[in-house]
Image: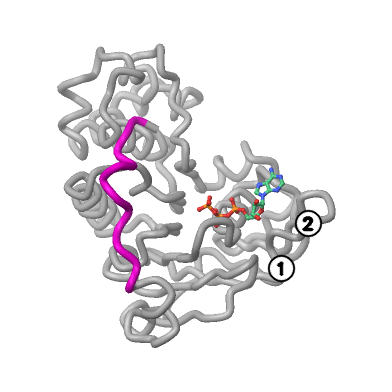
Amino acid sequence: MTQTILSTRDLSVSYGRAEALHRVSIDLARGSIVTVIGANGAGKSTLLNAIMGLLQSSGDIHFDGADIGELSVEQRVAAGITLVPERRELFTTLSVDDNLRLGAFWTRRDELSARLDTVYANFPRLKERWRQHAGTLSGGERQMLAMGRALMASPTLLMLDEPSLGLAPRIVSETFQIISNLGATGVSILLIEQNARAALDLASYGYVMELGRVPISGPAQVLARDERVVESFLGMAMRSDDDIGNR
Ligand code: ATP
């Protein structure tokens, strides 16, 4: 039987009087890749930030069999959840190596060095640039560093907020390949994307978010053929090259 690693029930978030998330219920099977797709402002980042504990929310969040709704962000990280935020939030004046170490600063030294070895094995380009300041990396390398830093926490659940944002199409493919490889190692992945086609190709299950609600969900292959999804998202061209940059 498939085990659920993460579930939200009736999760709601408001910014002042504006409700950004309305009674959202999602499930993620252990070891699977699940995607939430949707247009700008649909509430995707709000969902991830609420699961991470960065935002006040109402409703239930269960992770790995426990109710985590009252836990702090640090406790949720310790429980095995990490988030790669949309803006990556790297320490630009620190080296690649220091950024990675900060992803696991509370870890014992021998364990930390084992995790560094694993991350460098997954991201050889980061190893080549280990002494370089994060601020001087390309957009794709920054995304790799943000993912590498999250992996330093050895998460059970990795949440990725728009990893393709601002990347050239070639780098987008590379990034999705990396996510696929990570999924194959057994880590559960919740992937938020506007690039619906790539996300549905990668994920086993998907949710479509609109105005803070999830009106459509299903196996990714079914969603990819759903008329409403095709019309709203899959006709859309991939993010254009003019958005390439170092966000
Ligand atoms: P995007 O892809 O543009 O990041 P999204 O689907 O991730 O979109 P959210 O960023 O979660 O959407 O935003 C959902 C809604 O909440 C939007 O209407 C947004 O304007 C609003 N919102 C987000 N953050 C705040 C905030 N800090 N204060 C007030 N409103 C906010």
Q: Residue furthest right?
A: 17
Q: Is residue 109 above or below residue 225?
A: above
Compared with 169, 233 (above or below) is: below
Left or right: 157 in relation to 19: left
Q: Most prominent secondary structure in the magenta stretch? A: loop
- The percent coordinates of residue 129 (x first, y second) are 20, 20
Which of 32/196 is in front? 196
Instruction: Report the residue at 17% width, 30% height from top.
Output: 125
Mark drawn on residue 18: 2
Element type where label 2 sits in the image: strand
- Amino acid residing under circle 1: His
Q: Is residue 35 above or below residue 165?
A: below
Q: Which residues are drawn in magenta?
A: 235-246
Q: What residue is drawn where x is 27% and y is 23%?
A: 137
Residue 102: x %, y % from top left = 45, 23
Mark 2 residue CB less than 8 A from any atom of ligand 1:
yes
- In the rendered image, residue 239, in percent from the top left (x then y), is placed at 32, 53
Indicate the quadrant where residue 151 lies: top left
Residue at position x 52%, y 81% in the image: 216
Q: How many labels were placed on the picture?
A: 2
> 190 or 103, which is in the foreground?
190
Badge 2 density bin: few <14, some 14–19, many ≥20, Cα 10 Å: few
Q: Secondary structure at mark 1?
A: strand
Residue to which mark 1 is pinned = 22
Q: Which quadrant is home to the N terminus? A: bottom left
Residue 244 is one of the magenta-drawn residues? yes
Relative to residue 28, is residue 152 drawn left or right? left
- Residue 89 point in image, percent of width and height: 48, 30
The front one of 1 and 222 is 222
